Amino acid sequence: MNNILEIEELRTHFDTEDGIVKAVDGINLRVREGETVCIVGESGCGKSITALSVMRLLEQDAVNVSGSVRFGDTDILSLTKPQLRSLRGNDIAMIFQEPMSSLNPVLPIGQQIMEPLMDHLKLGKKKARQKAIELISQVGISRPEQIANSYPHELSGGMLQRIMIAIAISCNPKLLIADEPTTALDVTIQAQILDMLRQIKEQSNMSILLITHDLGVVAEMADYVVVMYSGKIVEEGEVVELFERPKHPYTQGLLRSKPIVGQRQAELYSIPGQVPNPLMLKESCYFHDRCEHCMSVCTSSEPFLKQVGERQKAACWLYEEVLTHV
Ligand code: SF4
């Protein structure tokens, strides 16, 4: 399988009055054709900033993005604004947690779906309208003509997210970046939306980069999982390998905090402590304050990702041979 997205040494640093916040700090990541890669971690770990950096949606004076983001042969970080607009519409689409913030409240839904069709696929008004109605129906909404004439405030959160997916897939993108797309929805609607995304992916061989804090969503959707902590990747691997044999103590903690269907648990585990202050990070394993396996080396040296399984890597001193000599 070819890689559709290749991220090398991506760094997104914010200049703040109190110092530099390294929100994403040197991550490498690949998404293969037709594969769903989930980035998981607590809030503030850098997963959303990664997605926004890939789409170049963070271009402000105080933000420094460096490294390389390749989509096929295209280096996204060096595209001009018009090239970027074309890539965003045609090849890569993005959906966010809050559909209402991406939709125009004073424009009918149908018109908002028609816009990318006319803009990027150069469809005429009549064909775009027809296609918009087909897309509304494809994302599982009945009475599509009527919905096309509705305004965003007239639809439920679940319907709006379906509309966002309709807009996202309208130009047949090769990659969909979805940032917590179901977090604001109730569990039944969440399951329906994830199911629909899976079906669309299978029909079109689209790749998905899915950002979530929810391991249930990861289990449902992922082929490959990337676990982030304090701006770094601490573990990655194929979903089965990572769920069955998590190596990094942080991943192990995340999995222990997840309720298990059919098992009575007196109290749900939660990882002790807090994510460290991004302005106070020093050379160490950033998880050391919260880790029950912490050793002296962990407090003074940063561990790097090492192969610990077939496609699995972990950044933890527990898996460094060098420790046998320490
Ligand atoms: Fe824990 Fe040390 Fe591994 Fe960090 S490097 S996760 S502190 S054992």
Image: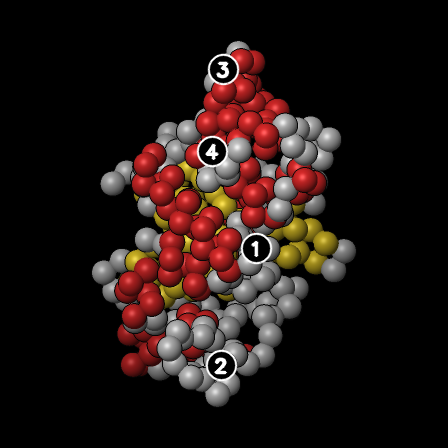
- Which sits earlier in the primary sequence, circle 4 or circle 1? 4
Q: Is residue 139 above or below residue 292?
A: above
Q: How far apart, in angstroms, are the residues tagged by discs 4 and 1?
A: 20 Å
Spatial CA distance of label 3 from label 2 is 54 Å
92 lies left or right of 185: left
The residue identified by callout 4 is 137
- Residue positioned most to the left: 310
- Percent coordinates x, y for residue 119 in the rendering: 55, 18
What residue is drawn where x is 59% and y is 55%?
184
* Callout 4 amino acid: Ser
Which of the 4 quarters of the picture holds residue 219? bottom left
Asked if 222 appears above or below 104 in the picture, the reply is below
In front: mark 4 or mark 1? 4
Q: Quadrant location of residue 164?
A: top right
Residue drawn 57% across and 55% down? 185
Residue holding disc 3? 127
Residue type marked 3: Lys
Tell me which amino acid carries mark 1: Leu
Proximity of marks 3 and 4: CB atoms separated by less than 8 Å: no
Residue 169 position in % (x across, y down): 46, 33
Left or right: residue 301 compared with residue 205: right
The answer to whether any part of residue 318 appears in the image is yes
Dot placed on the residue nearer the N-terminal end, 3 or 4? 3
Labels 2 and 4: the sequence-earlier one: 4
Question: Is mark 1 in CB contact (under 8 Å) with mark 3?
Answer: no
Q: Secondary structure at mark 2?
A: loop
Disc 1: which residue: 185
Q: Which residue is mark 2?
A: 269
* Res. 65 mark: none
Q: Is mark 4 within 8 Å of ligand 1?
A: no
